[in-house]
Amino acid sequence: MRLHLLLFSPLCLAGLTARAQESPAWPNPTVGEFVIPNFTFDSGESLDELELHYKTLGSLKVHKDGTTNAVLVMHGSSVVSSEQFLNEDFAGTLFNPGQILDAEKYFLILPDAIGHGKSSSPRNTGLRAQFPSYQYSDMVRANYQLLTEHLRVKHTRLILGVSMGGMHTWMMGEQYPDFMDALMPTASLPVQIIGHNRLWRKMFIDLILNDPDWNKGNYETQPLTSLRGAMSMLQIMFLGPLHLAAEYSTRDAIDEFFEEMQEGLLEHMDAYDVNNQIFAWNASYTYDPEADLGKIRAPLTAVNTADDLMNPPELRILERTVQEQMAEGVGKAVVVPVSNETFGHGSYIKAALWKDELQQLLSRTETRGPHHSKL
Ligand SMILES: *[C@@H]1O[C@H](CO)[C@@H](O)[C@H](O)[C@H]1NC(C)=O
Ligand SMILES: *[C@@H]1O[C@H](CO)[C@@H](O)[C@H](O)[C@H]1NC(C)=O
Ligand SMILES: *[C@@H]1O[C@H](CO)[C@@H](O)[C@H](O)[C@H]1NC(C)=O
């Protein structure tokens, strides 16, 4: 079980473990690239060419009434989408034959958001700290363009997102209310980033910006001291207290876990380009979907776990916003209790925890869509 926890460390989430491999069973895997010329960010900055990379599984079916079998799946901050999802706990629990999002039946779209994976980022464009200060609004708009202009998907059966992707899911529902039959944000809240969640992001960024070795983004080798500190903070926010204590029940065990984590970081330093990290964690700066929640029309089920330190249940934000801000009957808030099966913020990757909710959401939206006719 020790490996299990490591697998849900950010190292795992970046797809650096053996387990994050693609099952041969998923049909028609395709990787592609969409270039948006002259992409203008909400900040007013622009890129001559914004590259968006993505992976799809299955094939698109467009029904006579305009509904489709397309499912958009959006990843968390600072990871690579396809790598994050293609493991036993997520894809192996949802995408296999007979499972809820069977890739034989659905067209699954896994984009790399702006600044992530192979899509244009501070690192891979060579712009480093001069890269446009992209925000969630830009990432959501770019993903929408990818689907509508490049993949020719004018309507989706479901939009599902985890963590940052969960926040993008709320935004998609507000900005393109007729674009989906159903919405499922996980490990997220539909309010601006406050409290511990903002505090640790600010600390993470501040640590790096104040490291002379960062050199305003023009480092020769990555600033290791601040990167280690920043990644340690991320681990604390990611892990759940009960699971951590159960897996590593002694001081020495947890110390050993820490040492392994640091070794893993050193081994995969390249995956943690600090410029990419700063931009990714700051991209939630303008996130503030609360006022527009009433615009969401597609049925939505939001799932968090009670041991998620980024989205603490005692704030009761999820229940309050869904009940008070959303149109009646549209939203459902679910907070999964802490158990030996949850492990903090990263619980979103364990689809077994929330797949019954997903099944119910799909059932209750089966006859919906823009034309309210059966598929
Ligand atoms: C981008 O905009 C510039 C200036 O408006 C124009 O010269 C250029 O051709 C555009 N590039 C593309 C690929 O459309
Ligand atoms: C974070 O994003 C905001 C909004 O785009 C921007 O004003 C600010 O300079 C950014 N901070 C950093 C450290 O990049
Ligand atoms: C969780 O695991 C611990 C240690 O393995 C065990 O003692 C405890 O009974 C378990 N709790 C539940 C609710 O299953």
Image: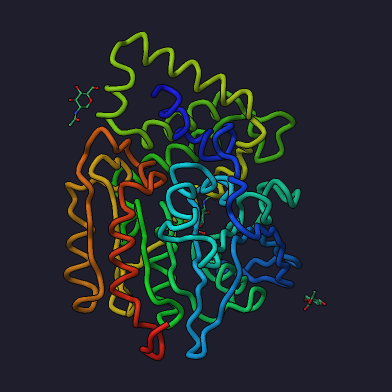
The residue under the point 50% across, 22% down is 261
Q: Nearer the viewer, residue 97 or 353?
A: 97
Percent across and percent down for residue 180 are 43, 76
Where 337 falls versus 322 (above or below)?
Answer: above
Q: Examine the image and state in which quarter residue 269 appears.
A: top right
Where 178 falls versus 318 (above or below)?
Answer: below
**Which residue in the rendered view is the most extreme toward the front?**
98
The N terminus appears in which quarter of the rendering? top left
Q: Quadrant of ligand 3?
A: top left
Q: Examine the image and state in which quarter residue 309 appears.
A: top left
The residue under the point 17% across, 68% down is 323
Count up the numbered dots: 0
The residue under the point 44% across, 63% down is 168
Percent across and percent down for residue 142 are 59, 68
Q: Nearer the viewer, residue 134 or 358?
A: 358
- How was this image coloured? rainbow
Where 280 falls versus 272 (above or below)?
Answer: below
Percent across and percent down for residue 213 are 64, 28
Q: Examine the image and state in which quarter residue 33 appears.
A: bottom right
The C terminus appears in which quarter of the rendering? bottom left
Percent across and percent down for residue 103 are 53, 61
**Which residue in the rendered view is the most extreme toward the top?**
252
